Image (spheres, rainbow, N blue to C red):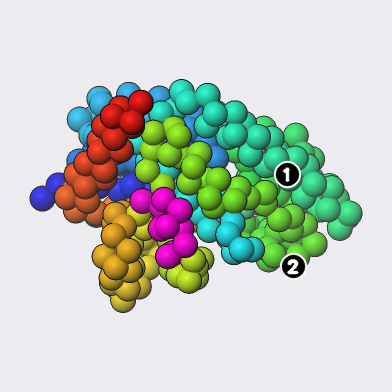
Amino acid sequence: MKFADLHLHTQFSDGTFTPEELAEHGARLGFAALALTDHDSVEGCARMAAACAAADIEFIPGAELTAEYEHMELHILGYFLDTQNQKLLTEIAKFQAVRQNRIREMVVLINEQGVPLEADSVFALANCKSPGRPHVARAMVKAGLVSNLDEAFERFLKKNRPAWVPKAKVSALEGINLIHQAGGLAVMAHPGLNRTDEIIPALADAGLDGIECFHTKHSTATSGRYLEIADKFNLLVTGGSDCHGFSKGKPLIGGIKLPYEHVEKLKQAVAARHSSLVIRH
Ligand code: AMP
Ligand code: ZN
Ligand code: FE
Ligand code: FE
């Protein structure tokens, strides 16, 4: 049986694997298709496409956007994105600039706690345009300012701790439109983690294409609930491990094996979208 993992992160956001390492793991585990979904970035897609091609794995270019709807945070996955799309790249560049400013703000707040972390050490460690809290935590461990990542989050970075800074979010409807105009499909990520069930009907109305029913943090019952919701609202079904490499303990790739038939349905939906666009023009 063929299977896929449609939720993966690399060093181009807060994962620890390079695209090549990720493709190597995918090949070792027998995946037929992989999607890269770095936070607010499509930068890793070119290398991942080449690495997957070399390993005879089908590659789907994607990204994970942080969004909000009525003050609720949700993550929206974009699949089959045109990674050269100008508007997508312009908007992503804005999110990335905001992420970089947020790192500086967090470092100032950490300094105010009497802890001498330097912003440049975080940027050097992150070495990507989409830095986040995990990079701050890693830089603190590296500088010997905390003994492990958990301590960094518990003492400074978690919500309601002294260095917590909210993350900029795109409105969910804008996020969906941004993905669509870049030729992609918009999918609600890990709904079981965000508790956003009540907004699924409105987002489905607004053009949401699918929901991530299978995720390493969804129980069997949770996945079952989202399969029913997907069926009810005529949404596509996706799934992925949300592997960040070694940044949260053991790599999660292999934890979700999405049956390939769901990839087929995604591809049919993209093809139908493109042909209807051609007819309309
Ligand atoms: P950000 O996108 O910058 O807000 O960072 C969110 C990332 O930090 C997510 O990938 C979380 O899984 C990770 N994270 C949140 N809490 C912790 C924690 N206690 N230990 C390690 N990573 C965490
Ligand atoms: Zn992440
Ligand atoms: Fe997420
Ligand atoms: Fe993710």
Q: Is residue 211 visible?
A: yes
Quick check: marks 2 and 1 in contact, CB under 8 Å?
Answer: no
Numbered range of the magenta stretch: 200-209
Q: Residue 160 carries which label?
A: 2
Q: 164 or 149, which lies in front?
A: 164
Q: Is residue 271 left or right of residue 196?
A: left
Residue at the extreme left: 1
Q: In which quarter of the image is residue 275?
A: top left
Q: 164 or 224, which lies in front?
A: 224
Alpha carbons under labels 2 and 1: distance apart: 17 Å
Residue at the extreme bottom: 221
Residue 258, image x and y in percent?
Answer: 24, 54
Residue type highlighted by circle 2: Asn
Query: Element at badge 1?
Result: helix
Q: 25 or 239, which lies in front?
A: 239
Q: Can residue 24 be seen in this view?
A: no
**Picture layout, residue 149 above or below residue 222:** above
Which SS does the magenta portion mostly show? Answer: helix
Q: 239 or 10, which lies in front?
A: 239
Q: In this view, does 120 lie to the left or right of 13?
A: right
Q: Quadrant of residue 235?
A: bottom left
Residue 144, image x and y in percent?
Answer: 72, 50
Identify the residue at horizontal 69%, vertical 65% (top origin).
Answer: 159
Q: Earlier in the sequence, mark 2 or mark 1?
A: 1
Mark 1: few/some/many CA within 10 Å (<14, 14-19, 20+): many
Residue 246, image x and y in percent?
Answer: 47, 49
Identify the residue at horizontal 61%, vertical 63% (top origin).
Answer: 70
Q: Residue 89 carries which label?
A: none
Q: Does the magenta stretch include residue 204?
A: yes
**Picture layout, residue 143 above or below residue 228:** above
Q: Mark 1 points at which residue?
A: 103
